[in-house]
Image (cartoon, rainbow, N blue to C red):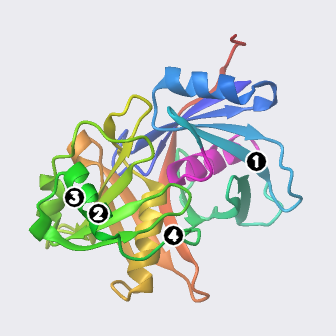
């Protein structure tokens, strides 16, 4: 087995979300995958496997420290990048087809070349949408630590992770949020608001999830949340064409996400990937 370390969605060197990608993971069971994920300590670690669907180029299992995820965004881009960097050739030119817990996900491969390469995944359909009820809204506001008067709307944007979106008045409101230290496992809450004038950023985001210890953790850059937000923003007419989002400032990151919708209506969540370490030997562990 080999392991790559990849920076996903960086707006500067080492400014994105780190990802570990394990190649040739057939010999690992899920318990071993989870132990390695926890030991590494990244938001997610992925494990590349042969596909079971004939349309797919590879299959991936995605783990975060509390368990397995059916889909996640920065692991999708990073896994596709690692597979390509290891010599993978997609069945369809220009598109990698990833098999994961939610099914097949297309990843566009046309972009900048090494050492950084821009990829984009097709945003999956929402598995839950619509407004939060009163109790859900109040609890999301409490856990995210935002001023209630700053909330413009509160909606579900689940797409694997059970994301709840609090859309706020301004980027300043997003950056001022002070999340609670603890939250129930399964908590996925994110904030979004229009970017500051003149910043070159159209939307400012933050995202929080509960880890296996019950702590509410801020993610540096979150592809699945950006995908859920994009589906909602395009679906409600709040955006059109393309936009650039930023995430991670409050945890020392500088993430950049490039979002667009093509003529067929597919929403693409794009970002750069940079190889930090490639092909390290992963020795067997009990």
Numbered badge on residue 141: 3
Separation of residues labelled 4 and 3 (CA atoms): 19 Å
Verify CB contact (< 8 Å) between mark 4 and mark 3: no
**Mark 2 to mark 4 CA distance (whole Å):** 17 Å
Q: Number of numbered discs present?
A: 4
Circle 4 sits on which residue?
A: 128
Q: Position of residue 96 (x, y in %)?
A: 72, 59
Q: Mark 2 and mark 3 in contact (Cβ < 8 Å)?
A: no
* Position above or below: 119 against 201: above
Q: Residue at x 56, y 47 (%)?
A: 75
Q: Quadrant of the C terminus?
A: top right
Provide residue 63's location: percent of width, then percent of height. 58, 38
N-term mark: 1 or 4: 1
Image quadrant containing the N terminus = top right
Cα separation, mark 1 vs mark 4, equals 25 Å
Lateral position of residue 63 relative to residue 219, left or right: right
> In the rendered image, which residue does mark 2 sit on?
135
């Amino acid at each position: 087995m080999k392991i790559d370390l990849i920076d996903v969605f960086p707006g500067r060197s080492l400014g994105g979300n780190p990802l570990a990608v394990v190649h040739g993971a057939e010999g690992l069971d899920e318990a071993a995958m989870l132990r390695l994920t926890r030991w590494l300590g990244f938001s997610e670690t992925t494990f590349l496997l042969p596909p079971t669907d004939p349309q797919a180029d590879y299959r991936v299992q995605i783990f975060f420290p509390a368990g397995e995820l059916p889909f996640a965004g920065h692991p999708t881009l990073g896994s596709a990048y690692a597979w390509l960097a290891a010599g993978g050739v997609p069945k369809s030119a220009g598109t990698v087809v990833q098999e994961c817990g939610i099914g097949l996900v297309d990843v566009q491969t046309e972009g900048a070349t090494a050492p950084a390469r821009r990829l984009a995944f097709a945003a999956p359909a929402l598995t839950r949408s619509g407004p939060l009820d009163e109790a859900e809204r109040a609890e999301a506001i409490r856990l995210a630590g935002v001023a209630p008067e700053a909330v413009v709307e509160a909606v579900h944007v689940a797409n694997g992770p059970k994301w709840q979106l609090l859309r706020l008045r301004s980027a300043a409101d997003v950056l001022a949020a002070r999340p609670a230290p603890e939250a129930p496992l399964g908590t996925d809450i994110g904030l979004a608001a229009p970017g500051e004038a003149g910043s070159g950023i159209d939307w400012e985001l933050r995202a929080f999830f509960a880890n296996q210890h019950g702590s509410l953790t801020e993610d540096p850059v979150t592809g699945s949340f950006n995908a859920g937000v994009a589906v909602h923003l395009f679906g409600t007419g709040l955006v059109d064409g393309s936009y650039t989002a930023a995430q991670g400032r409050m945890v020392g990151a500088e993430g950049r996400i490039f979002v667009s919708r093509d003529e067929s209506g597919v929403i693409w969540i794009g970002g750069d990937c940079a190889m930090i370490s490639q092909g390290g030997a992963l020795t067997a562990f009990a």
